[in-house]
């Protein structure tokens, strides 16, 4: 085990966020939902960002943590995108956020995973933190801190203990809050300076924010805990937090908030967006390879990619529908209530399945199309394939499939509305989803 105390924390890169380079000021935050993602300016920003990120990653080993690319994101104007505009975020609407995540995923899946975790953590602080905590998070964003959510754990998962303070006479001071235990799959590992830990406390699962530079924080990395098939650059190691001391202000929200629906499960829409970004790049690279070899005219190759494109398009449309239902729920939860939430969660399962199935079909088609020769260096396929295969492994996939199937048989009445997108036709074609192919869901402790 490598020991990490405050002094060992990697230096935080200062942010240069100052004026937003994203071009999305607060005024644009007040535009109708969805309009940002369809604006040519935003789409061109996403393309440009993706290209610059790709450039910054060129030539890096697949084990190298993407520090330079993260620094680029810090300066992009989007570093605080997980915070609501009210809490200091850039005011991106939900659909634009998914577009942004997909654009980052196109550049690199490991980078997308890290950024998605950062966004997720800030969204949780925005949703459940008090005024002081959200202000602190906005300040952390300005100073470039990297957030993450580390929920996954094994038998030795993290517990929150209220222990008597040994420095105070018994009964004279409140108990000390200490952590005991470890997390697995902690994306970003020791590079994350603001990990948000769902920990088991006396009242249930409690969100605790650790400030790795502060006295009291103890983080030990278990050597050899990360030798994955792909996504090596995320450094998703096992970390032990035993002995860390927290302050009451480090606890975010109330016990049980982390599992509150629909936020707990709907976060899956964001990792699906990143995964689809990786799929976009794999498909584009495969087409480029076939062109380069003069094989794109071959009918067998062409036949292979018709269902692949169809699957990716279906996943993109399902994702757009998930985002629309999430927005509808947020706007109308008082009247829509339980039924809207149920429909949204069913859609999240559908997006997960559509994304997983489409990506697996793409992986299979790509491997067959490029053959062994294409799976050699310097072609990018081996790495892209391993990253996507690894990242597709998310919590309890079969449980999601089962829930969806059960719901379908209980609710299908033959009407198109049951499975239609519900989007007006004009919006469907403008959304970009239709033309764009070029701890979520389980309370199991092993889930995020
Ligand atoms: C690159 C990467 C980065 C990650 N980063 C983070 C992170 O930063 N923070 C974090 O919290 N997590 C992280 N994770 C973990 C992730 O969120 C999932 O928890 C993890 O990937 C699930 O792995 P699994 O395939 O073993 O899932 P499982 O849910 O264990 O699924 C594996 C198989 O077991 C089956 N199964 C599941 N439950 C049961 C059961 N009760 N009985 C029988 N069968 C069952 C499933 O259907 C499936 O077939 C990361 C994962 C990856 C791959």
Image (spheres, rainbow, N blue to C red):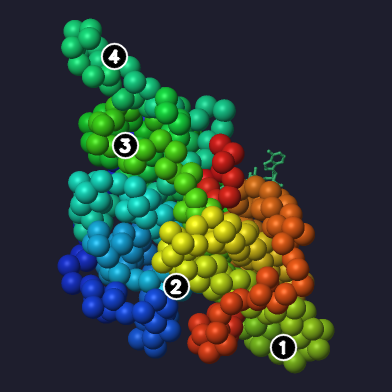
Q: Quadrant of residue 40?
A: bottom left
Q: Residue at x 74, y 82 (%)?
A: 306
Q: Quadrant of residue 313?
A: bottom right
Whole-angstrom CA distance, mark 3 to mark 1, is: 56 Å
User: Disc 1 or disc 2, which is closer to the eye?
Assistant: 2
Whole-angstrom CA distance, mark 2 to mark 3, is: 30 Å
Q: Residues within 10 Å of mark 2 (few under 14, many from 20)?
A: many
Quick one: label 1 or label 2, which is nearer the N terminus?
2
> For numbered disc 3, what is the local secondary structure?
strand
Percent across and percent down for residue 125 are 33, 49
Quick one: label 3 or label 4, which is nearer the N terminus?
4
Q: Residue at x 39, y 76 (%)?
A: 33
Give me the disc on residue 296: 1
User: Disc 3 beta carbon < 8 A from ligand 1?
Assistant: no
> For numbered disc 1, what is the local secondary structure?
loop
Task: Please identify the residue farthest to the front as the structure is shown.
Answer: 335
Mark 1–mark 2 contact, CB under 8 Å?
no
Quick one: label 4 or label 2, which is nearer the N terminus?
2
The answer to whether any part of residue 146 appears in the image is no
Percent across and percent down for residue 20 are 23, 73
Is 387 placed above or below 299 here?
above
Q: Residues within 10 Å of mark 3 (few under 14, many from 20)?
A: many
Q: Which residue corresponds to mark 2?
A: 95
Is 182 placed above or below 49 here?
above
Quick one: label 3 or label 1, which is nearer the N terminus?
3
Percent across and percent down for residue 87 are 25, 59
Q: Which residue corresponds to mark 3?
A: 251
Q: Quadrant of residue 369?
A: bottom right
Give me the disc on residue 420: none
Give me the disc on residue 164: 4
Task: Please identify the residue farthest to the right as the structure is shown.
Answer: 300
Whole-angstrom CA distance, mark 1 to mark 2, is: 33 Å
């Amino acid at each position: 085990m490598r020991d990490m105390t405050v002094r060992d924390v990697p230096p935080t890169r200062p942010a240069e966020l100052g004026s937003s380079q994203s071009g999305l000021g607060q005024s644009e935050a007040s535009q109708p939902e969805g309009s940002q993602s369809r604006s040519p300016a935003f789409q061109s920003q996403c393309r440009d960002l993706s290209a610059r990120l790709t450039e910054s990653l060129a030539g890096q080993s697949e084990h190298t943590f993407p520090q330079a690319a993260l620094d680029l994101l810090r300066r992009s104007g989007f570093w605080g995108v997980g915070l609501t505009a009210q809490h200091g975020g850039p005011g991106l609407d939900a659909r634009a956020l998914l577009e942004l995540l997909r654009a980052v995923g196109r550049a690199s899946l490991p980078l997308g995973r890290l950024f998605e975790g950062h966004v997720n953590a800030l969204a949780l602080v925005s949703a459940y933190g008090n005024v002081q905590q959200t202000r602190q998070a906005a300040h952390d964003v300005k100073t470039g801190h990297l957030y993450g959510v580390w929920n996954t754990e094994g038998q030795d998962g993290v517990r929150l203990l209220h222990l008597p303070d040994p420095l105070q006479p018994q009964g004279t001071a409140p108990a000390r809050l200490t952590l005991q235990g470890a997390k697995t799959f902690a994306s970003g590992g020791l590079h994350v300076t603001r990990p948000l830990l769902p920990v088991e406390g006396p009242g249930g699962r409690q969100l605790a924010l650790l400030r790795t530079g502060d006295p009291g924080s103890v983080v030990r990395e278990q050597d050899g805990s990360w030798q994955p098939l792909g996504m090596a650059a995320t450094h998703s190691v096992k970390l032990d937090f035993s002995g860390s001391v927290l302050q009451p202000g480090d606890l975010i929200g109330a016990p049980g908030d982390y599992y509150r629906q629909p936020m707990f499960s709907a976060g899956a829409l964001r990792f699906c967006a990143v995964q689809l970004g990786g799929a976009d790049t794999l498909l584009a690279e495969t087409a480029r390879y076939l062109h380069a070899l003069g094989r794109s005219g071959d009918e067998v190759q062409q036949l292979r990619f018709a269902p692949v494109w169809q699957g990716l398009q279906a996943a993109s449309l399902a994702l757009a529908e998930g985002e629309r239902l999430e927005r509808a729920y947020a706007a109308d939860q008082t009247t829509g209530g339980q039924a809207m939430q149920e429909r949204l969660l069913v859609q999240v399962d559908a997006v997960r399945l559509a994304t997983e199935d489409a990506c697996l079909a793409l992986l299979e088609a790509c491997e067959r199309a490029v053959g062994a020769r294409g799976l050699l260096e310097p072609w990018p396929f081996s790495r892209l394939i391993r990253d996507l295969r690894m990242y597709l492994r998310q919590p309890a996939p079969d449980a999601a499939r089962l829930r969806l199937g059960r719901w379908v048989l209980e609710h299908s009445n033959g009407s198109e509305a049951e499975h239609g997108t519900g989007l007006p036709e004009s919006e469907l074609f403008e959304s970009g989803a239709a033309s764009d192919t070029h701890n979520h869901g389980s309370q199991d402790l092993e889930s995020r």
